[in-house]
Amino acid sequence: SEHTGRLHSHSPSWDFSSITDEDELSAVRYRPERLDHLEQKTNFSKKELQVLYRGFKNECPSGVVNEETFKSIYSQFFPHGDSSMYAHFLFEAFDTRNNGSVSFEDFVVSLSIILRGSITDKLNWAFNLYDLNKDGCITREEMTDIMHSIYDMMGKYTYPCIGDNAPMEHVDNFFQKMDKNNDGVVTIEEFLETCQRDESIMQSMHMFDSVI
Amino acid sequence: MAAGVAAWLPFARAAAIGWMPVANLPMPVAPAEKNKRQDEMIILNVSGRRFETWRNTLDRYPDTLLGSSEKEFFYNEDTKEYFFDRDPDVFRSVLNFYRTGKLHYPRYECISSYDEELAFFGIISEIIGDCCYEEYKDRKRENAERLMDDQEDNKDAKPPNMTFREAMWRAFENPHTSTMALVFYYVTGFFIAVSVITNVVETVPCGSSPNQKEVPCGERYTVAFFCMDTACVMIFTVEYLMRLFAAPSRYRFMRSVMSIIDVVAILPYYIGLVMTDNEDVSGAFVTLRVFRVFRIFKFSRHSQGLRILGYTLKSCASELGFLLFSLTMAIIIFATVMFYAEKGSSSSKFTSIPASFWYTIVTMTTLGYGDMVPKTIAGKIFGSICSLSGVLVIALPVPVIVSNFSRIYHQNQRTDKRRAQKKARLARIRIAKQGTSNAFLDSKKNGLFNEALEFTSPEEEQHLRKTTSLLENQHHHLLHCLEKTTNHEFVDEQYYQQSYLEAGLQTYPSRSPSLSSRDGATGTCCTRRSKNRHAPLQNASGPPHMEPLTHQRGLQELSTIHILPLSTSRSSLNEPASLNCRITTAIISIPTPPETTPEGDAHLPTGPAHQNVVKVSAL
């Protein structure tokens, strides 16, 4: 691979006293892979990659997204509530290499799965998102966290009011649907099987295919 | 939602896939991607400089000109680009706003031109980024103040119908507005000077009388000085009473500083008048004379610099206060120290702490009279420390006061300069306007030329075709239409005034416009036509004007406008060639039957050119 430059996780600091000369030197300069390589790796066309990269680079001139920026970008779309938790989970899902930052490759590879991948890939990706500790199964706690984060994005002013138990009920609902052998966890196979049998889920998975 | 992250919306939507499996309800239908265009480049040609950007970039802000369909008005089909006839430098900032989501204000740019560009492109100025917002607001405020100043200057224009009292007050406050006020201004100034000099000279010993004692002039020429004093005080009293009468708010006037100075200046005299008899208070009377020196402050009405100084001191009150306070502290400290240091030495002048104050002050201000000097070593050490610190303490607040004065003074200079420039500017604008209206008057002939083209001989066509632009022609046509609508005509000032005179001299009926086809007076004073029949020479006496030529000869709808010579001298008429006529010959295009070539016209240039119309350009 032709990664040039060192990947350096650099979180923006708003504290003036910590802006030193050293900060300037260690600014990240990261360049992604070549366009044709990325084209092969993903299911996007050259033009689509170009559009994606332009947007990416505009917002993250340094070439990588760290979690703070990721959260701030995502929160712009959900001004009502608090999307930081969900953004965190998303970040974890995008950060396939687990190094605290999302490069353009990670970004585009994940997007390719979500938007251009097969239904199985998409479902796998979703499962990966829910499985916080990446151990292959979704526990009740993990799902609860996910659910809470989703409901947090709604904010306070909703109709009807979001009760305290709403996330829990939703989790119960989910487990009821997915957990076939009632062992308290949802494995990937259970997940795939249930989803593939559910018409509405199947349909909704394709909804955003033409987004790019 | 910021524009920059608009590019991330597809990502956010894609990430929504994470909700799908856990959703209980079916999802709503996604909005149709209306013929999703591939992102294309668009070219923005701003006064020749080409900017290229993606269409998506501009679409980020749909409520601006570039982001909405408004830009289609500027689309040029031939070159397939959007052309804007605006400043390309400012456009850079505008376009950068779309690209980065932040609007910056370039410091070198003029604030009003920048505002205009923003307004044109439909961008509100509130979104200027924090980095530039302060500068922008400062400049805008400065500009607004300047505009307000200009407007205030307009109030200088004399409002009509002022009462005598108001007029007098205005004369007092602004001496330059009328000659009377100016005279009064100088007279009072002169008398103030006289009064001050008198006071000074009064005390000079002048010559010795036979008894060897030298007496001051005041006692030698008592009567003379008394008369001068009386005269001055009389003037001052009259002035004060007049001001009091004219003041719009007498109470406020009496409380103002200047009036108090006035009162204090003249009061001693009157008190002296009253009290000369009483021996006891004559001593007090003498002291009162000291107050006569306040007359010198009356000069502050005459000197702007003095006023500025006073205003500066007032505005620097806090700095002055600080100076005073720190000085007092230092004086007390050093006086105490010096007193105790010198206590031991014999015959020391430092008898008490208050006595040491004098030494400390003199030393700290680096005066050093030398009447009190420390003798002990400790005293000398502390004395030197005292003088060193004095330099510092005094040097600190002084620059602040100086800079304040400088700022206020320059502000005043600028206001005066602006006022002076404004007069010149307005004069120039008036001349330009005059030029335009005269051009219209001239081109009225031109217009006729164009109408009468078929009647002119070809070579004259060249003459006729003045180099008036299409714009001018259209403008003039518009004014012409207005004339026709209202049945009145445009004339220049001179003619208008003269027409009043003429109205008396001539028996013509009042100016009735244009195409009156009456034989006699065509209504206007300059009825060339009619006069042609009687006394062509009379034409010369006509004031310059424009008159539609009444076609008496079957010239349908040909209104000739001839402009008579400005000067009513006949001689000028006699030499039409020498007149500054620009387009004279052409109008004559009207073929008039021979009979209209009156005998009287003999003195006029013959030929079709100068038949019925004597036209000379007014300019």
Image (cartoon, helix red, strand yellow):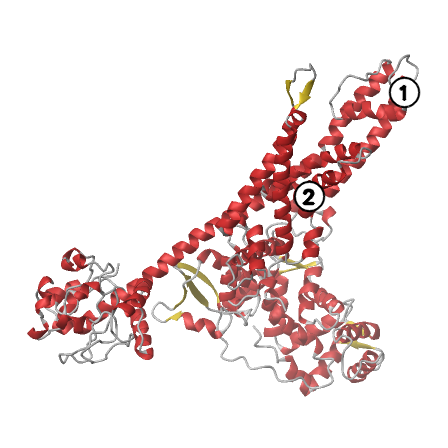
Host chain of mark 1: B
Mark 2 neighbour density, 10 Å: few (under 14) some (14–19) many (20 or more): some
Mark 1 neighbour density, 10 Å: few (under 14) some (14–19) many (20 or more): few
The three-letter code of the residue at mark 2 reads: Ile
| Occupied quadrant, residue B168 | bottom right
Residue at label 1? B351
Place of residue A181 in the rendered image (x, y in percent of width and height, measured from the top left): 82, 82
From the viewer's perspective, is residue A205 above or below residue A40? below
From the viewer's perspective, is residue A197 above or below residue B84? below
Lower position in the chain sequence, tag 1 or tag 2 = 2
Q: Considering the image in quadrants, where does the C terminus of chain B appear?
A: bottom left
**Circle count:** 2
Place of residue A167 in the rendered image (x, y in percent of width and height, measured from the top left): 81, 78
Between residue A131 and residue B304, name the one nearer to us.
B304
Residue at label 2? B261
The three-letter code of the residue at mark 1 reads: Thr
| Occupied quadrant, residue B473 | bottom left
